[in-house]
Each structure stands twice: as structure tokens, then as C-alpha cells.
Amino acid sequence: MSLKITLVYVLRKITEASLALVIGLAASAFLMAIYGYDPGKALYWLFYGGFGTRTVFLDSLAYATPLMLTGAAFAVCASAGLFNIGTEGQAYMGAVGAVIFGGLLPRLAPSLGFASMPLALLGSATLGMLWALGPALLKVLRGVHEVISSIMFNWTAFYTVMYLVRGPITNPARPEMSLPVEPQARFPVLFRGSILTGAIYVAVIASITAYLILKLTKFGFEMRIAGANPDAARYGGVNIPRTILLTYLLSGSLAGLGGGLIVTGRPPVWSIYGTLGNITNVGFDGIGVSLIAMNNPAAVVVSSILIGGLWNGSRFMEPYAGVCSELSRAVIGLIVIALSIPEALRFVRRTFKRWGV
Amino acid sequence: MRRLIRASLAITAFVTILLLLAFAGLSPGSLLEASLLAMTPLALAAVGESLNEKGGVSNIGIDGIFLVTATVAVFGAEEFGNGYAGVVVGVITGALLGFIHGLLSTYARANQIVAGIGLNIFAYGFVPYFLMAAWGFPGIRVPPKEVLIPLRIISFANISFRVSEFSVLAIALAVSLHFLLYRTPLGLRIRACGESPEAVDVAGVGVYRLRVILSTIGGALAGLGGGFMSLAWFGGVVKEISAGRGFIALACVVASGLEPILSLGFAFIFGFSEALAYAIAVTPGIKEVVPYHLVLSIPYIVTLAIVSIFIGKRRFPRALGQPYIKD
């Protein structure tokens, strides 16, 4: 019986996510049609470029890797009723952490070279966590809404990282990017001819761990109850400020790890561009990833592949269908808007009933 | 009386800061000019947002509305060959986006924060796409000078001061919306709509309809800010033109506790910090000492500081952000 209920529940969630996906794609097809593009052709290349062949699918998995972590980061916070849209800035800081601890530090102290991969992972998670501490403290101590404070932290991170990448941690040989991480810190490519590296294992393990923390531990239970019903949680003896703080730190470390894995896990640059081009938007699109997964860190593993595919496929949409690749981000936004209606299915049914269909 | 004392204290502090900066080699006149310009989009959006938050709908998507309307305003200005027509296009687009957000937040019972985040992400993708689709050039559009809106030059004695009519409009709107909210029956209804929608409903006023209208007005004012940004202030559009200003506007709203006039004041403080950051970044003698990119993050840090200082005393409408469900 309980299995049946679970199955029905999962099916309903999948149907809702698919409905949102269809709405997002339909609306973007409409946008393309307005400006005289061929939506069929563009969407074909979007999906063919994301999932059509073995090689592009492997590349999509590579793009999905950091998204999985920023998605899990948003999902963890969302389970506690918090909106961590600071994952963007936390991922920037994570990328810097990977460069500092996986590139700069082993360079200064070559005896640490053998440990540069764990150092890079640890450094990125720690810096991401520290960057999440700000909005968390402001929320707990002053009641500042996390959406506003995190955006300010995002922009501060953006300019700080830009300063660092062009100044203290710049690559003297190639000033348009930061120092690369040491070869020992780079994840090996899994399949020849694709950019998929072992970093995806880290992302999957971290997401599943986050899921298990949420579902199995006392802390996870407190998080979920604080999100679902703060009054009941307080009455039940949950220390809400402490829960908020810890949730934020967990979320920030996941997002930081995501940013770090872009540097240590995606060939060929192994560093941060001076424009931050290779690390921007990874946090924002993680929000889409998490919402499509109904804020479940385990389901994030699947939905991140979808968004990673959109990222990868959009690179094909531009040369073959002439449509600007950033349209894929508009698609994600439309999907998120569609997902903001929790009872979308019932809403549709209700509306149809009203019209007598 | 107490308010008067506080306001005069704030003004004295500000003048002192200006004088200090003048000693550091920054011109107070041009700083004031730049602050007023930077204040305007923040104030327009903040005033609109405080109106619709009073009614119970919060719109996190202002940043997205800024981006979209700044872009389509340039398009409109070039199509009609007139900057003001472009601003009107921006206002209409903003109203449309606000209207959609209003519908989602009321009839569709959406999660307002998620819908707003979606609106922002949509804008981050739509704007580059639109720039490419409309002009075939990635990321930036500088329209011909004839369709831009020039600043007015006010001069008395030998001091000339450049100011935009939109700044004046923003101030006038803040004052008149304050009176609308606190001195008219309609204002009472709006505030009640955010405090206890059930009572408004029982009194025979459609909660959903009122909220949708307020959200539309909020969107239109943000659209006015967007159009001002591209056509009167920057003289063009880049794909990151809003640079998080939508969220700074939200910060003005929450720091002021949804009071239009107070949020205008905060908008001025943020505008001033932005003007100061740019002045520091370009003034010889100072710019060599402080790293350019770190200086650019000053407005965001000021926002954080101000919000955390002022938010503690504020009280927000009880039904803010909650979908109203009729029994």
C-alpha cells in the first residue's frame, strides 16, 4: 500500500515536472517564431546537441556535474523553507578556493603537490561555506530576507573574484585567466573524446549524501520540519536559528564544491577565465535544476542532466539554427515560472472545468 | 517633530560627507548629479514595489523586469524614432510582466518567490536572445543619439546642474503614493488587502483583482525605471544592464518597511554609494590605490549594511507573500 502511494506520488511529481517542461519549451518556441526563427529546427538541434549522440551526451553529463551540486545546494535549503539564491556567489568562491588550494598552494609548497586534489575539493567547499555564512547570519541575527542578502553577496563575490583572477591569482603566462590547478588536482577524463571527468562521481556522491542527511538524520528531520511548519518545530524543541545556520553552511559547501569542480573537473582550461565566463550562471541554473527535481537532492542527479543537456545543446542551436544560445536560459526561466504553481495540474483541470471542457 | 529632527540630522550628515569628499578631490556637484541619476530607477521600482507589497504581493522579479524593459525600450525608441515612445514601450512591457506575476500570485496561487526567481532567470536568457534577434549583435546595443533622452540643464548663477525629468517624477510619485496609501479610502483598502484579505473580501472588494492591478502598477513603474536606465542614463543597453539593481530596489523597500517616501530616501543613499564607487574608480590619485573591481562592489556592501541596520524595526503586512485562498 505504502509503495503504491509512493509510486503515485512520484508519478504525479514527474507529470508536473514534464508539464512545466512542455510549457517552457512551448513558450520558447513561441518566442522563436515571433522573431522569424524556425522553432522546430532550433529545438531539434537543442535536443540533438544535448542528447543525440554518445559523445554529446557524455559532454552533457560533464556540464551537468556542477549543476548537480548547485541544484542539491538549493534543494537542501528549500527543504528547510529557505531560498538560497546565493549559490551563484558561493560557486564563484568555490572556484577560487579550488584555484588557491589546488593551484597556488601546491605551487608555493611543492611538497603538498600529492594532496592537491583533496586540498582543492576541501578548499572549494570551505570557501563556499564561508560565503554562505554571511546571508545565514544576517537572516538569523537581523531577519534580513535571504533572497536580498544573497544577491548582494553574489555581486560582491563577482567583483572580488574578478579582482583576484586579474590580480593576485592571475596566470603570469596567460593573463586572461587565473592560475591553473596542478595536474594532480585534475580529474581524469573518463571517455576519450569527451570532456566528462571523474568529477561527476564526486557530484553524485555529494548529492546522494545530502539526500541521506535530509531523510535519515535528526538534523535533516529538524531541517524539514522547520521548513514545513516553523511553529510546530519551535514547539517541538527545534533550535531554529541553529538549524537555519547549519542548513545554509551545508548548502554553501555544496555550491562551493560545484564551483570548484568546474575548475578541477572540466578540460581544457583548469582555471577561471578573467571574464568569469566559465563559472557564471552555474548557481542560477542550479535553481532550475532543483525546482524541476521538486527540491529533492537525489532527483537533482537526474534533472541536472536535463539542464546540462540544454546547456550543451544550446551550443549547437546557435550555429545550426541561428538562435542565440542564451535562449536556453530563458527556457529554464519559463520552466521555473511554470513550476512556481504547485498545483499546476489541478489549476489546469479547474480552468478547463470552468470553461466547460 | 521627531521625524523632522531625524530628517535634518540625516541631511546634515550627508552634507558633511559631501564636504569631506570635496576635500578628497571629488566634485560634490557631479557626485550629486550622478547620485540622482542612480537613485531614479531604484526609486521608481521601489515605490511601485512598496505599493504592491502593501497589497500583499511581493515581486522578486524586479531585476528581470529592469533588464527586459531596458532592452525593449531601446527597441521601441528606435522603431518610433523617439526616446519617450521607447520609455512608454518599456512601461507597457513592465506592466505586462507585473500583470502576469499578479495573475500567477493570485488566481494561480503560485509561490511568489519562485515565480519571481523564474522571471529573473528568464530575463537573463531573454535579453541576450532579444539583442541578437533584433540587432544581430551579441550583448550590447547603442542606439543612435537622436532617440536618446537628454538630461535637462538647470543653471543658476554660474552653477549648472544636469538632471533628468524622471528623477523629479520619481520624487513626485513617492510623495503622491504616500498620500494615496495613508490619506485615501483606496489606500486603506490596499493596506487592508495586505493585512487581512479576508476582511477586504467580506467588504465586497475583490482581493485578487486589486492585487493584480497593484502588481501591474508595480511592474509598470519598474518598467519606467528600466526605460530610464537604457535611454536617459546609460544611453544604450548591455545584457547585464540591471547589475542587481532590482534587488537593491527590493532592499530599499524592506529597509523602509514599505514606506514610499522612506524608500525614496534609501534609493538616494544607494544611488549615492554607486556614484561614489564610480567616482573613486575614475578619480586620479585615488584610483591607483584601491583596486577597481573591489570598489565596484561598494554599493552591494552598503546595501547589506543598511538593510541589516534598519530592518530590525520594521513590521510587514501579515498576508505578504501568502496566496489568498477563498473558502
Image (spheres, coloured by chain):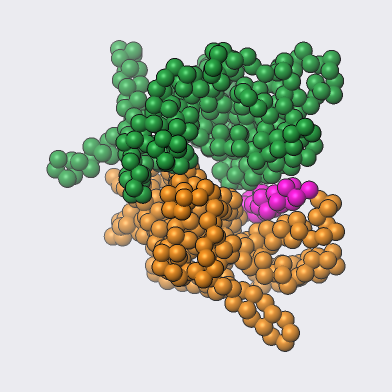
Q: Main secondary structure of the magenta part?
A: helix
Q: Is residue B154 left or right of residue A320?
A: right
Q: In the rendering, at what x and y percent does residue B29 appear? A: 73, 72
Q: In the rendering, at what x and y percent does residue A327 appear? A: 44, 41
Q: Is residue B161 left or right of residue A357?
A: right
Q: Quadrant of the N terminus of chain A?
A: top left
Q: Nearer the viewer, residue B50 or B242?
A: B242
Q: Is residue A151 visible?
A: yes
Direction front: furthest residue? A320
Direction left: furthest residue? A356
Give the orange chain's letter: B
A185 is higher (above) or lower (below) than B282? above
Q: In the image, which residues are magenta?
A: B291-313
Q: Which color has been applied to chain A in this rendered view? A: green
Q: In the rendering, at what x and y percent does residue B186 appear? A: 39, 67
Is residue B299 magenta-colored? Answer: yes
